[in-house]
Image: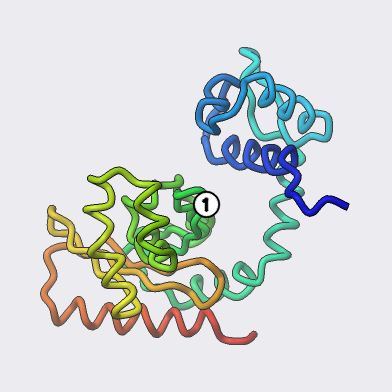
Amino acid sequence: MSSQPNQSLIDGIRCLQYLVSSDRAIGCRELARLMGINTTRVNRLLMTMASIGLTMQDEQRRYLPGPGIHALAAQSIRGSELFSRALPMLERHAPRDIVVALGVLWEDQVIYIWHSVPGSPTSQALAGFRMLPAWQSVIGMSLLAAESDEQLMTRFTPEQWLHLAPHIAQQRDLGHVIWRHEDGEISMAQPVGAHSAALAFAGMWQVGDEIVQARLKELHALNTRLLEKA
């Protein structure tokens, strides 16, 4: 048997992930451009997934996630150790006066599993935020540090790498990232064990070092809770 990865399977999974992450109906050409593959191939993949209910088309023949995605999502959540451990802990213990986020890396994008903002019901925090380029996210900065500089510099522009490099060095040196934004916001993140995920606090504006250190301690404590056995 061949030990080579099945490229059709890889492309199909990537296609579905891009479609679900787009938050809108999307045409084959645009999806092909995002994925960097042939339009005809994308169309064939989407039609194949439509046959089992994972995708569907609107009146303009653009594609949307189909009803089968709900079953896949429920099965994925049930099969995820990170979900089963982290979500109950976040619902009970995440601070309500700042932004709290839990995210994972996918193709140099951060996918948010949890994203809560002050004053919003916790039920809206589950997968309630768009994906974001990793170099623009404190979660992305924290997780990218696990890769070598040589790998990263081939994937990001010189300007993006200039922005990333000091935060990646901070993660490697200290085990967390504190990002002091130009507009006065503070955000921070720390990886969550071996789950290829990171927990972040954000939405802290014009705060002093004493508060930053107190929030960092709170972040570490909540992260420890996420790793506790049920």
- Residue at the extreme top of the image, as rendered: 60
Closer to the camera, 46 or 130? 46
How far across and how far down the image is residue 66, in percent? 71, 34
Of the 4 image quadrants, the one containing the C terminus is bottom right
Q: Is residue 66 above or below residue 214?
A: above
- Look at label 1 and name its amino acid: Trp
User: Would residue 174 be seen by someone viewing this image from the given angle?
Assistant: yes
Q: Is residue 224 above or below residue 61?
A: below
How far across and how far down the image is residue 56, in percent? 71, 27
From the viewer's perspective, is 74 left or right of 31?
A: right
Report helix, strand or loop for mark 1: strand
Q: How many marks?
A: 1
Closer to the camera, 93 or 120? 93
Name the residue: 59% across, 28% down: 37
How far across and how far down the image is residue 68, in percent? 77, 40
Which of the colour schemes (rainbow, by chain, secondary structure, one colour) is used?
rainbow
From the viewer's perspective, is 195 left or right of 162?
A: right
Name the residue: 73% across, 49% down: 5
Crowdedness near tag 1: few (<14), some (14–19) or many (≥20) residues, C-alpha within 10 Å? some
How far across and how far down the image is residue 138, in percent? 33, 61
Query: Dot 1 corresponds to which residue?
Result: 106
From the viewer's perspective, is 165 left or right of 19?
A: left
User: Would residue 119 be seen by someone viewing this image from the given angle?
Assistant: no
Q: Is residue 220 above or below residue 144?
A: below
Closer to the camera, 109 or 78? 109
From the viewer's perspective, is 214 left or right of 41?
A: left
Location of residue 188 by image quarter = bottom left
Name the residue: 34% across, 55% down: 137
Location of residue 3 by image quarter = bottom right
